[in-house]
Image (tube, rainbow, N blue to C red):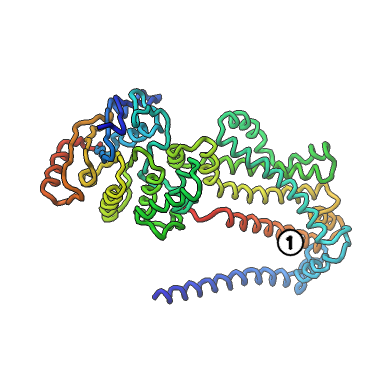
Amino acid sequence: MKHKTLKHSGNKQWKYLIMSVCSIVTFLLVWEVCTDVLHLTTPTTLPSPVRVFSTFIDKFTNTKPDGATLQVHTLESMKVALSGYFIGVVIGVPLGIAMAWFKPVDYFVTPLFDLLRPVPGIAWLPVMIVLFGIGLLSKAMVIFLSAFIACVINSYSGIKNTKPVHLWVGQTFGASNLQLLFKIAIPTALPMIFTGLKVALGASWNALIAAELLAATKGLGFMINQARGIYRPDVILVGMIAVGITGAILGAVIDALQKVFIKRRR
Amino acid sequence: MSKVIECKNISKTFESVNGDFQVIGDISIEADQNEILVLFGPGQCGKTTLLKVIAGLEPATSGTIHINGKEKTKPGPECGLVYQTTALFPWLTTMGNVEYGPKVQGVPKKERRARAQKYIDLVGLTGFEKSYPIQLSGGMRQRVGIARVYCNEPEVMLMDEPFGHLDAQTRYLMQEELERIWQTEKRTIIFVTNNIEEALYLADRVLVMTNCPATIKKEFKIDLPRPRDYTDPEFLRLRQEITSIVDPAE
């Protein structure tokens, strides 16, 4: 009986996998038919998937038309995004924790933070360009702000989620305030903190591409923007695919870290 | 005989915008060494609040608490609590939960591991040291809760309806288990319940409490031999007598 149900669920999983593959294949087929077969659009507005794929492979070695290969652009983008992201995490997570745990910090920082919060990170770009030019620093600052806000919010609510009964246990065991924070509140908040890290990573990546579209000399956003200027939609699409893949890989790294740090729980 | 715990004239009033609300009205209780004292009362009569006051988690509006002669003003390791709902740390294993108290106290790893293992064995969870709370049944979780309090070696153990959320079968089993554990390692226990069978099965003394504000209505000394029989005529007579004087729950 048990064996049968197992087999059944295995069958179901196969079905779902086939359906997922079908959806992607259908999408690519419709795209191909509209472009290469029926020629509904010109290659300068929408290139065929085959063309995009060949450009994608070609971009690994070809520096034209934007001055660098795909991997150079990707690395440049990652460098900027990760530097801003790390500063955001290193400052944002402890600040969020401190705001949630220590009342004076909360009262002092929260009004200022609430003022900053609704301003999208990318809205800071003009200010940053005026202050720091169009180099790494201005973009890193924009990304820092985007990541920082997500980290603070999630760490804050994670700590606030601590169950009173867990704190009572700690107190009746004679734990000090700092022991309560490090041994009870932070372990409670860890899943939320990781959610914050993921949201912040997404926000950083978004902010980066937006920033590069406006102010850059290298990077995926820059590559996309250059391609737009010279009617190379295939390069634009290659850029978008690279943005998507890199973002997904970075997200997967955080997921893997989360699995290592957060053990079984309810 | 010296008293392990002495609470004198405790009262507790919560202040709110809608006026003051008295939960506990002038209660004095004391317990001897290794005695099981059961506080028995209707539904929401302030028993949990009383335990929190005794544990130092809620300041009393008036009155004093002394444990082995020392006045208690804040929560500390001399009072351990077993809670109604599962209060285990979900990110720690059975071992991690049980050794938590000594760890906070700074007991060296080897010593606290040995101590934790002893109490894990005592509550019958040998082999489940590495399980997380989510992998355990309700009864097993409360066993971990009991081992955790034992392991911290408090002078008084407070138990706040620890079996209230278990199904009837498991509840009987856990009452017998607590009796066995206590017979092996005797401690002073203040046990709160609204279940008369549980009260009579475990108690050396039962304090019947009134409805809110909680006061002590009557004290019963239970001299039946242990382990007790739920169907013993004397057991049933006491059950009848106590039930007849309890206030109806609101």
Residue at screen point 56% across, 36% down: A100
> Residue B11: x and y, percent?
32, 26
Identified by mark 1, the residue type is Ile
> Residue B71: x and y, percent?
37, 27
> Residue B101: x and y, percent?
45, 43
Residue at screen point 59% across, 42% down: A155
The quadrant in which residue A43 appears is bottom right
Secondary structure found at label 1 = helix
* Residue pointed to by mark 1: A241
Residue at screen point 28% across, 37% down: B33
The quadrant in which residue A91 appears is top right
Q: Residues within 10 Å of mark 1 (few under 14, many from 20)?
A: some
Residue at screen point 22% across, 35% down: B207
Q: Quadrant of the C terminus of chain B?
A: top left
Q: Nearer the viewer, residue B150 or B48?
A: B150
Q: Is residue B118 left or right of residue A93?
A: left
Q: Is residue B137 left or right of residue A150?
A: left
> Residue B144: x and y, percent?
39, 51
Q: Nearer the viewer, residue B21 or A86?
A: A86
A67 above or below A193?
A: below
Q: Is residue A140 left or right of residue B56?
A: right
Chain of the residue under the numbered disc 1 shown in the image: A
